[in-house]
Image (tube, rainbow, N blue to C red):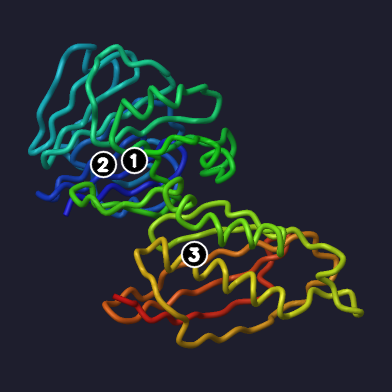
C-alpha cells in the first residue's frame, strides 16, 4: 500500500510500499508522527523540520535551490524530477505524482497519475487539468484555513478527487470516486433534497460527506425550534449519500438519533457524516449536525444493508 495523506493547505505525507516517508511542504495540519526520509518544498512554509519533529540524520531535503530545473534525484524507492519553477514530479511504486507550487501551466506534455494543484488565487483551465492527470487533487483552497470546501467543489474537473485534511488515498488502487461523478449519479436525490430541505451538498468522497441546509420559517415549530423530523431527515439523506459514496447500495436497517442542544435562532444546519464501519454486508454511518456557530446540536447513527 502506498498512502498519500492530505494534511491541509499545501501539506501532504506520502508513505511508499517500501515504507519510505516523504513529506511535501510540511507545515500545516496533523499526522507528523513519522520521521521524514525525504522532504520536498514547492511552497514557502513557516514551520521548520525541527519544530515539526520529523527530522532525522539522513533526511533528504529537495527544493528549487538544491535540485535545479531539469535535474533529478533518486532516494530509496522514490525518484524526484524538478520539472520547472516550483513543480516537481515524484515517481514511486509505478505511479507519478505532480506537485505544483503556484504555477498554472506546465510545459512538459505528459499525463500524470495524480496532480496536486493549488486552487486559491489561480485560474486553472478545466480542459487542461483533465488532460494533465488521471486524478487532480485540489490543495491550498484558502489563504487563511487548512481547507475551504466551497472553493474545492467549484473546480468542475471530472477527474477531481477531493481529499479533506486527514483523509488519505492508496495511490496504487483505482477505486477512488470523485464528487463530480457521484453528483451525477445522485442528482435526482440531491435535487429533491435541495427543493424540499434547501440543502446543498458541500463535499462527498469515499465514505465522507458534508452538507448544509438553510432553515426556513416552515421548518420551525411554534416554539421557535427546528422540527425534530427536519433535522432527522437531513441527517438521513446525508448518511445515505455517504453510504453510496463509499460504494454501498441498499436499504436502511436501523437508526438512532439524539437531540443535544436547542436550535433556536439557527439560520442553517451543517451535517458531517463519516463511514465508521464498512463491511461486506453492513455499513454503519455516523452523522453529526451542527448549527451555524458550529455547535453540535444533534447526532445519530445509520446502519445499512449492502445489497449485492
| Residue at the spot 46% in from the left edge and 74% down from the top edge | 285
Quadrant of the image containing the N terminus: bottom left
* Closer to the camera in the image, 192 or 198: 192
* Closer to the camera in the image, 41 or 258: 258
Would you name the residue on which mark 2 appears? 55
* Closer to the camera in the image, 295 or 155: 155
Would you name the residue on which mark 1 appears? 50
| Residue at the spot 46% in from the left edge and 65% down from the top edge | 242
Question: Can you say whether 101 is above or below 278 in the image?
Answer: above
Quarter where residue 257 is shown: bottom right
Gap in angstroms between the C-alphas marked 3 and 1: 42 Å
Residue 280 rendering spot, x and y as whole percentages: 26, 77
Mark in the foreground, 2 or 3: 3
Would you name the residue on which mark 3 appears? 241
User: How many other residues sit within 10 Å of disc 3, few (<14), some (14-19) or many (≥20)?
Assistant: many
Q: Are marks 3 and 1 in contact (CB under 8 Å)?
A: no
Residue 23 rendering spot, x and y as whole percentages: 29, 40
Dot 2 falls on a residue whose secondary structure is loop
Amino acid at each position: 500500500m502506498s498512502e498519500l495523506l492530505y494534511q491541509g493547505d499545501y501539506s501532504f505525507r506520502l508513505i511508499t510500499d517500501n515504507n519510505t516517508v516523504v513529506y511535501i511542504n510540511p507545515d500545516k495540519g496533523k499526522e507528523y508522527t513519522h520521521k521524514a526520509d525525504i522532504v520536498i518544498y514547492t511552497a514557502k512554509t513557516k514551520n521548520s523540520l525541527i519544530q515539526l519533529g520529523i527530522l532525522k540524520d539522513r533526511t533528504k531535503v529537495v527544493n528549487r535551490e538544491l535540485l535545479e530545473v531539469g535535474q533529478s534525484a533518486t532516494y530509496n524507492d522514490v525518484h524526484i524530477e524538478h520539472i520547472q519553477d516550483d513543480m516537481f514530479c515524484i515517481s514511486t511504486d509505478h505511479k507519478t505524482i505532480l506537485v505544483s507550487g503556484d504555477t498554472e501551466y506546465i510545459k512538459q506534455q505528459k499525463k500524470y497519475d495524480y496532480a496536486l494543484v493549488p486552487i486559491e488565487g489561480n485560474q486553472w483551465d478545466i480542459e487542461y487539468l483533465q488532460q494533465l492527470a488521471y486524478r487532480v487533487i485540489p490543495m491550498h483552497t484558502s489563504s487563511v484555513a487548512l481547507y475551504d470546501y466551497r472553493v474545492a467543489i467549484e473546480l468542475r474537473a471530472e477527474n477531481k478527487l477531493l481529499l479533506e485534511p486527514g483523509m488519505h488515498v492508496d495511490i496504487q488502487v483505482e477505486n477512488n470516486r470523485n464528487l463530480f461523478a457521484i453528483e451525477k449519479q445522485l442528482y435526482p436525490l440531491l435535487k429533491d433534497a435541495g427543493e424540499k430541505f434547501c440543502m446543498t451538498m458541500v463535499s462527498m468522497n469515499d465514505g465522507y460527506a458534508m452538507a448544509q441546509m438553510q432553515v426556513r420559517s416552515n421548518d420551525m415549530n411554534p416554539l421557535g425550534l427546528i422540527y425534530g423530523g427536519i433535522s432527522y431527515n437531513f441527517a438521513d439523506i446525508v448518511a445515505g449519500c455517504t453510504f453510496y459514496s463509499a460504494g454501498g447500495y441498499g436499504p436502511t436497517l436501523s437508526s438512532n438519533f439524539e437531540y443535544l442542544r436547542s436550535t433556536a435562532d439557527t439560520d442553517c444546519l451543517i451535517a458531517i457524516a463519516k463511514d465508521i464501519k464498512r463491511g461486506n454486508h453492513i455499513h454503519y454511518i455516523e452523522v453529526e449536525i451542527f448549527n451555524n456557530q458550529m455547535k453540535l446540536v444533534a447526532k445519530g447513527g445509520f446502519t445499512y444493508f449492502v445489497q449485492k
